[in-house]
Structure formats: C-alpha cells, structure tokens
Amino acid sequence: MARITFLLPDGTRQVLDSGDDPTVMHVAVRANLPFLPADCGGQLACASCMVEVPEAWRGRVGDPGLDEGDMIEDALGTRPAGRRLSCQIAVTEALDGLEVVLLDRQG
Ligand code: FES
C-alpha cells in the first residue's frame, strides 16, 4: 500500500491510500477525482488518465513503456518529460509518498 498525493489544477491536494488498487489510475477513479476520466478503464486505449510526474519522482516511477509513449505522443504530438498514463503506473511500496499532477485538459 502507498499513500499518493494528487495535485489538482485548482491548487488543492487529495491524499489517498492506495488500498488494494493496482495502479495510480485506480486510486484516483475510486475516489472520483476530477480531471481523470480514465475512459478505457486501463486498457491503454484512451490517454485520458494522463498525469504529470514531478521531477523528483520520475526516477522511481520510471519512463513510459513503448506503447504508452506512443499513446502520449498521439495525444499531445510530443512526449513531454514526466508525462505518464496513470493506468500504467503500478502501485508499489516504493511509491509511498508519490505526488502526481492532474491535468486540467487532456491532450
Ligand atoms: S485509462 Fe485509458 S489509457 Fe489509461
């Protein structure tokens, strides 16, 4: 289990325990957080679960996988550093304390 802080576009923070949720996306969806519709339910088919990982966490979270990177590029036309699809970030104890930034518009 990990505690994850979601930074919302309006400047507020939501601190959530992951419980048994397998990914960062699942944690956010269970709490009905805005700005993260996760339309495909984690099937790597929508990019609507995109988040920004602050620089301090990028090493531990890691880079996007090949297909994930392609999805990000398809959505944005580029691959900005720190962008990840939250359904592809598995929750592990190593991510306890993680902060991720929710984006006010996808794409
Ligand atoms: S929920 Fe659709 S790609 Fe992550």
Image (tube, rainbow, N blue to C red):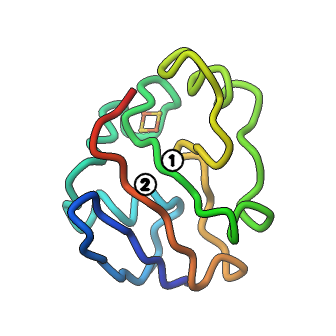
Q: Earlier in the sequence, mark 2 or mark 1?
A: 2
In percent of width and height, residue 67 lies at 69, 25
Residue where numbered disc 1 is placed: 87
Amino acid type, mark 1: Cys
Left or right of 54 on screen, residue 102: left
Task: Please name the residue shown 47% across and 49% down the image.
Answer: 51
* Image coordinates for residue 33, horizontal then vertical, percent: 23, 61
Q: Amino acid at mark 2?
A: Met
Question: Could you say where residue 52 lies in the image, as x and y percent from the top left?
Answer: 52, 52
In the rendered view of the protein, which quadrant contains the C terminus?
A: top left
Q: Secondary structure at mark 2?
A: helix
Tell me if label 2 and label 1 are in contact, CB under 8 Å.
yes
Which residue is nearer to you in this view: 84 or 87?
84
Q: Quadrant of the N terminus?
A: bottom right
Q: Which mark is residue 25?
A: 2
Ligand 1 location (quadrant): top left
Would you call the spot at circle 2 few (<14 residues within 10 Å), some (14-19), or many (20 or more)? many
- Real-space CA distance between mark 2 and mark 1, rounded to the nearest whole angstrom: 5 Å
